[in-house]
Every structure is written in C-alpha cells, then in structure tokens.
Image (spheres, helix red, strand yellow):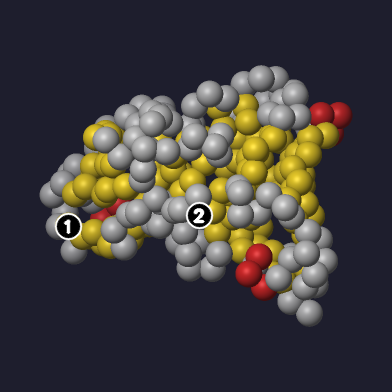
C-alpha cells in the first residue's frame, strides 16, 4: 500500500486559516469515512485532532475541522496560533482491512 | 481514561527479533470497544501503521511487514505485544502502542513511544 500524499509544508500567519490536504485513492480515502488527523509536536506522541473525516474528540478546539471530497481529505486550521506549529499526519482505512498513513506535513506559523 | 505504556529493549541486534509489550490501564483489553495497534515512526519521518489485534485475537498487518510481524494479546496481564523478526537498521524507529475505538478511526489513546535502535 502506498502512503497517502500530503504537502511537505504549509505556512500561514497568525489568525489566518490554512488547509492541509491528504490524497489517496478509491481504495482508501475515496472508499471510507475512516480518515483521521493527528498533530505532533517535536519529541511527543501524536495527538488525535479529527476522526471519521470530521468528528472532533472532546477537548480538541473547534478551530480544527475536517472534510473529504473524492479521494482527498482535508484538515483546516482556522485562527492560526503559534502553538499550531507542528507536524500533521493523516490516516485512512483501506479496502485491504489495513490502515495507511500520509507522508506528513510541517505547518509553520510565520 | 485509557493509558498505554510501552516496554522492551531499546537496542536489538541485526537479524534478531524485536519484542515490545504494551500495558493497558483504564480499559478492559478483552472488551470489544478497542482494537489494539502498533505504529512506528522512523527518525525524522512520518508514521507507519504496523497492525492491530482485536479483543478476540483477530489481526491485521501492514502488507510490507506481514511476513515478519506478530501481534498477540495477553488478557490476564492486560497487555498486548509486538514481535518483529529478522530486524535490520531500517527497523530503527520510535514504536507507539495505540488504542483505537473499534469500527472507527478514533486513534485516541497513545503510549508515549519507545525508541528501538537496531545495531550491533
């Protein structure tokens, strides 16, 4: 299975909105709503931000939202803050009954 | 709150078997609410899904690792384990154990991760 494709980096200024994409195929992202997003600061474990395309766990800010269109899922961060500077990862369930992760995106707050 | 903690050797010789254990607290490892997963991260790289085990012992593995990996369940000790055979330096990574709500992509409960280095 091939890794989902994410942009290597995305940047924005404080207060702006940015979107991170996660492109797969009809065998994963396009076929299931089991897509999740994670935030990871250096030296720490990933933290779940979004699951099942657009659901937020309790405690996660509403500034983080998820969506999907066709084979591409997206994570939008609104009202960008300095602490949002981190790596972001997506994952999707696949038709093989496995999960596949994305290539990862570094978000920089200018 | 579900808590997970990885344990095992931090150094493994090439061609040997990497063995890690994850101890779960705050949830019953034998309930059907969770799939118990292993994920790894090579230094400076993205995440790689290794596989999971269900409460009844059903497993699913990454095709690229399937020939070398086994995930098992020890309900009496509330633990699940990872064994990766015939390791090379390409298996050097931080290994995470994760609890995933069954039937969803809610990878909500992570261990802190443990670095395993493959080197002679």
Could you say which is closer to the camera, residue B3 or residue B18? Answer: B18
Depth check, mark 1 against mark 2: the one in front is: 2
User: Which element is circle 1 on?
Assistant: strand
Could you say which disc has been placed on residue A12 in the image?
1
- Residue B115 lies, with reference to residue A92, above or below; the image says below
- Residue at 19% from the left image edge and 49% from the top image edge: A18
**Residue A40 visible, this angle:** no
User: Are the residues flagged by discs 1 and 2 from a single subunit?
Assistant: no
Q: CA distance from mark 1 to mark 2?
A: 24 Å
| Residue A12 higher or lower than A101, as above or below | below
How far across and how far down the image is residue B16, in percent? 82, 66
Report the quarter where the C terminus of chain A lies.
bottom left
Q: Quadrant of residue B84?
A: bottom right
Would residue A73 appear left or right of A17 to someone viewing this image? right
The residue located at (48%, 64%) in the rendering is B45
Q: Left or right: where does residue A79 sit relative to residue A86?
A: left
Q: Which residue is mark 2?
A: B47
Q: Position of residue B77 (x, y in %)?
A: 84, 33
Q: Position of residue A8 (x, y in %)?
A: 31, 63
Compared across the picture, whether B68 is left or right of A94 comes to right
Checking the image for residue A28, the label placed there is: none
- Which residue shows up at 38% across the image and 31% down it? A31
Any part of residue B119 in sight: yes
Above-or-below relation of B108 to B6? above
Instruction: From the viewer's side, name the closer residue of A52 and A77.
Output: A52
Q: Residue most toward the bottom?
A: B120
Label 1: chain letter: A
Give neighbour class at mark 1: few <14, some 14-19, many 20+ (Cα, 10 Å).
Answer: some
Foreground residue, B40 or B2?
Answer: B40
> Measuring 81% from the left and 29% from the top, which residue is drawn there?
B75
């Amino acid at each position: 299975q091939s890794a989902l494709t994410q942009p290597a980096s995305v940047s924005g200024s404080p207060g702006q909105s940015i979107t991170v994409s996660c492109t797969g195929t009809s065998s994963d992202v396009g076929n299931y709503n089991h897509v999740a997003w994670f935030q990871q600061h250096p030296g720490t474990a990933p933290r779940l931000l979004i699951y099942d395309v657009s659901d937020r766990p309790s405690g996660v800010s509403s500034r983080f939202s998820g969506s999907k269109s066709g084979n591409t899922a997206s994570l939008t961060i609104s009202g960008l803050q300095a602490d949002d500077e981190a790596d972001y990862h997506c994952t999707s369930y696949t038709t093989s009954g496995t999960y596949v992760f994305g290539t990862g995106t570094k978000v920089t707050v200018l | 709150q579900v808590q997970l903690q990885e344990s095992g050797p931090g150094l493994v010789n090439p061609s040997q078997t990497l063995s890690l254990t994850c101890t779960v607290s705050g949830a019953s490892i034998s309930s059907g609410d969770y799939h118990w997963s292993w994920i790894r991260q090579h230094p400076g790289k993205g995440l790689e899904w290794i596989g999971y085990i269900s409460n009844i012992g059903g497993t699913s593995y990454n095709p690229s690792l399937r020939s070398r990996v086994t995930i098992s369940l020890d309900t009496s000790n509330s633990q699940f384990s990872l064994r990766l055979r015939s390791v090379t330096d390409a298996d050097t990574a931080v290994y995470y154990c994760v609890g995933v709500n069954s039937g969803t992509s809610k990878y909500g409960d992570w261990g802190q991760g443990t670095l395993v280095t493959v080197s002679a």
